[in-house]
Image: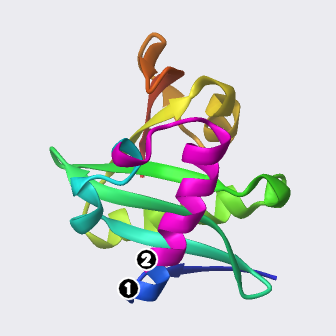
Amino acid sequence: MINVIRVTTDEQLDDAFRVRKMVFVKEQGVAEEVELDEYDDVADHVLAYTDNEPVGTGRVRIVDHMAKLERICVLADYRKHSLGKAIMKELESIAIDRGVTKAKLHGQVQAAPFYEKLGYEIASTVFMEENIPHVKMVKNL
């Protein structure tokens, strides 16, 4: 069973960081000191569970009156089970609760079709972040 919660405790935040490290640091080779950054303290985080096991996460910040969705990831063994969609829905819900009407994200090029299915549109050419090709994507909430 999929359960996505808004992070409210240090333990939940540690679980979110652990998932991010497994995906971005171990799987994709992003430096840990880049992955965990100063924005973690000001962002709202969500955590996805399957059978009480943390398996996905994401965060959202309000930047220039827009929701910036970031650090969205799901552990490899749990992809293709609608966890990413559930994470995105909760992040967008947080943004709406904060009175924001637009969202943006920097999506990895390989994940762009996933975001497009959720209503995001590509709004840039390809650019590199941490040696991974990305595109800016936007959506009206």
Residue 131 included in the magenta stretch of the image: no
Give the extent of the magenta segment: 13-33
Query: Relative to residue 54, is residue 11 drawn left or right?
Result: left
Residue 8 visible in the picture = no
Magenta part mainly helix, strand or loop? helix
Q: Residue 138 location, x and y as percent? A: 42, 35
Q: Can residue 97 be seen in this view?
A: yes
The structure residue drawn at horizontal position 18% and vertical position 49%, both measured from the top left corner, is 65
On whether residue 22 falls in the magenta region, the answer is: yes
* Residue 72, percent from left and from top: 54, 52
Give, as a three-letter code, the residue at label 1: Asp
- The picture quadrant where one finds residue 113 is top right
Question: Dot 1 corresponds to which residue?
Answer: 10
Decide: few, some or many residues near mark 2? Use Cα within 10 Å; few <14, some 14-19, many ≥20: some
16 shown above or below 62: below
In the rendered view, tell whether residue 15 sits above or below residue 108: below
Where residue 15 sits, quadrant-wise, is bottom right
Residue displayed at 41% across by 60% down: 59
Residue annotated with mark 2: 13
